Image (cartoon, rainbow, N blue to C red):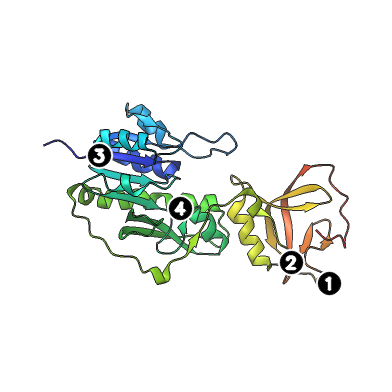
Amino acid sequence: MPKPRILFFGYSEVGYECLSLLLERGDNIVALITHEDNPSEKIWFKTPAVAAREKGIPVFAPENVNTPEWREKIAALAPDLILSVYYRHMIGTRILAMPRLGAFNMHGSLLPRYRGRAPINWAVLHGELRLGMTLHRMVAAPDAGAIVDQDGVEIGPRDTAEQAFRKVLPCARRVLARQIDALLAGTACETPQDDAQATYFGGRKPEDGRIDWRQTSQQIFNLIRAVTDPYPGAFTDVDGSRLMVWWAEPKTLAPGLRRGRAGEILSIAPLVVATGDGALELTRTEWRGAVPPVFRPGLVL
């Protein structure tokens, strides 16, 4: 009896790890549908296209998979199962209905929390201490289908988003390894999500890294670690120049050092800036743009 035909949609290192697992098992991958690397994005991760091409798997990167042309091409591939792992576009319901064994997605959060884009960055920004991966059935609404399995790990309160990602990454492979045989047999157990517990966040843009000094020191610190390198970074604009803040430390103000207004420079060496409830010491920064202004105590960012 021929092995079920798997059509794999994927990107990112999560997609690489999951596709690699299937290829190591000898599963029947009929094609990979992925994304072209964005020249304006820092590609710091492995992508599934590397794993697919090593094994001679056809690789496609359409701008829009939901056109009549691509629906016909996917139908011609006759998939029995669709797996989506960090594929960045919504897959239409006409495609989701094609495989007899269903369509399932690996999402980078412990659903139903953090549905949507960039879940690990959002979770770090909100100070979460436990993150994970969830395998769920794909439906019309993003990340809302019944859960097949999930696995989580603890992260540290000082972890960057990349460090958190590295800790969470093995969860995806563990979940898929546990469930792939049941998916291929059509016997996977599914548990509906509790929509009352759901949270949803959209994609993040570089502009979302702008620091609001009125926030608490902890909120700003969480933003910095959520978007620091290899992501676009947190920043503040000063007199036409942009100060990138790649790392900072919440600061206990020394005796006699006044608290200051939010965004006010309290000292130069070290560089300490007042926040909504205290201060941050900016320990790793980079100027971009015009000639940087001369910092002085009392200057408000």
* Mark positioned earlier in the residue sequence (1 or 2): 1
Residue located beneath label 4 in the image: 167
Indicate which disc residue 214 carries. Answer: none
Question: How much space separates mark 3 and mark 2, taking CA atoms?
Answer: 54 Å
Note whether 12 is above or below 266 in the view shown. above
Which of discs 3 and 2 lies nearer the camera? The answer is 3
In contact (CB < 8 Å): disc 1 and disc 4: no
Residue located beneath label 2 in the image: 275
Amino acid type, label 2:
Thr
Amino acid type, label 4:
Lys
Which of discs 1 and 3 lies nearer the camera? The answer is 3
Amino acid type, label 1:
Arg
Identify the image quadrant of the N terminus: top left
Residue located beneath label 1 in the image: 258
In contact (CB < 8 Å): disc 3 and disc 2: no
Identify the image quadrant of the C terminus: bottom right
The extreme left residue here reads 1
Question: How much space separates mark 1 and mark 2, taking CA atoms?
Answer: 12 Å
Note whether 262 is above or below 160 in the view shown. below
* Residue at the image point whose x is 28% and y is 64% from the top: 191
* Residue at the image point whose x is 57% and y is 39% from the top: 41
Residue located beneath label 3 in the image: 79
Q: 159 or 288, which is in the foreground?
A: 288
Within 10 angstroms of label 2, few (less than 14), some, or many (20 or more) residues? many
In contact (CB < 8 Å): disc 1 and disc 2: no
Which of discs 2 and 4 lies nearer the camera? The answer is 2
